[in-house]
Image (spheres, rainbow, N blue to C red):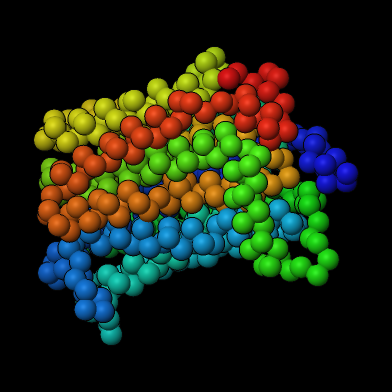
Amino acid sequence: MGEAMAAHRPVDTNRGEIFSWAMYDWANSAFSTIVVTTLLGPYLSNLAQASGGVSFLGMRFEPDAFFPTMVSISVILQVFLLPLLGTIADYSALKKRMMLAFALIGSLSTILLFFVKPDMPLLGTNGAILLGGLLFIIANLAFGAAVVLYNAFLPDIAEPKDRDRVSSFGWALGYLGGGLALLVALGLFTVMSDKELAVRIGLALAGAWWLIFTLAFPARKLRQRRPLKELPPGESYLSQGVKQIWRTLTSMYRLYPETLKYLIAYLIYNDGIQTVIVVATLFAATELGAGADVLMMLILMIQFLAFLGALFFGWLAGRMGAKKSILISLVIWAGIVIYAYGFLYQIWQLFMMGVFVALVMGGSQALSRSLYSQLIPRQNESEYFGFYEISERGTSWIGPLVFAAAVQFTGSSRVAILSIILFFIVGLLLLIPVNVRKAMLDAGNDPSGVVI
């Protein structure tokens, strides 16, 4: 009885806390924008090309295949960590502490990317590339872990009817913050004659931005609530977490089938979105010859337009529902991939395509998060968001692995990018039959006032 009552505890809404929560998106988006999307992939690829590839334990990577492989490795590790982490957070009062700890680990690992450079003492260029890959794996693993806990605060701070708006606001602030950080990096790249040093400073800037704004806002204003579940006698957080993962999977199958259908659809179509984000700059650099300055201007444009796109899709969801709005975005995503494969040959076409990427990128991800928060039981948010985060932004692994394999065997980024369309088509077909109202009722959530 106590747990059931706690599960329906009223939301303690506070505008200042909502803003500070959203500012974590502002903080960590510098990592997504500068490191994942813009600079690190092409930088490591250029180092690898200069040294004739990357060698590790007898294996040899094509230059353009190394970074997507590192992305996949970091997310495979997340597959094991994140659901367990979410379960521990649900049974303890450690959600905020763990979020801040992982943000610290991720930001410091990112700052250390500054020291990755050609002909490093003791390591050489090949060792420097491998060090860069290791630091990225640590940073991206920590990034995903912190976002699980960050997302799990959404039901604490926003009523169900407000979540589309609050989630979209967080994504919008994230695109704005990431865009401003990238603008600073672009300014450094423009004025500095040593371009390699400018890239390294830009990578360190992303980590510093992540750290400073985390300490300034969520660390100060975000409040830890009392956990909605108590740890059973004789159990540790780890043992209960392992058991609860299995229970969650089985209960989702038996009790929340519509939520499971949605999660599967999301894991697939968001894998496509994340793959586009990860490989877009590699594609532009390899197929179109775009330099670092062009790539930064492109991503900068996308960031600021995505700010408006996230707000637009939040408005659209308020009129036609989150699910229908997501379906529209997936059709546009599929069109973007077709365009990239068949028609993208000039730099000006790259910027034209970037307008459509910006429109749907923020909206599809913000609404996916808010819709999922409506479909999960109130007392298990962290745990359920652990499964969700396996395919959250910057953490998908199947798509980058498929892309890396295609590049490895064909040597063509253009051929590889066509395979991404399957993720959008399959995800769309799986999302269409999801019954949102039934999923909300099954999870014990009130659909009143929610546009479905």
Residue 89 visible, this angle = yes
Residue 299 visible, this angle = no
Question: Does residue 437 appear to the left or right of 267 in the view shown?
Answer: right
Image quadrant containing the C terminus = top right
Which residue corresponds to the image point at 65% horizontal and 30% vertical from the top-left?
440
Which residue corresponds to the image point at 40% horizontal and 35% vertical from the top-left?
427
Q: Toward which corner of the image does residue 255 lie, by quadrant?
A: top right
Foreground of the two, 95 or 2: 2
Question: Does residue 169 appear to the left or right of 397 in the view shown?
Answer: right
Tell me where residue 224 appears, x and y as whole percent. 74, 51
Tell me where residue 161 appears, x and y as whole percent. 67, 24
In the rendered image, the vertical position of residue 432 relative to residue 179, given as above or below:
above
Residue most toward the right?
A: 1
Foreground of the two, 32 or 55: 55
Q: Toward which corner of the image does residue 88 lie, by quadrant?
A: bottom right
Question: Does residue 370 appear to the left or right of 306 in the view shown?
Answer: right
Question: Does residue 378 appear to the left or right of 112 in the view shown?
Answer: right
Foreground of the two, 209 or 35: 35
Image quadrant containing the N terminus = top right
In the rendered image, the vertical position of residue 349 relative to residue 88, given as above or below:
above
Residue most toward the top?
A: 319
Which residue corresponds to the image point at 36% horizontal and 35% vertical from the top-left?
426
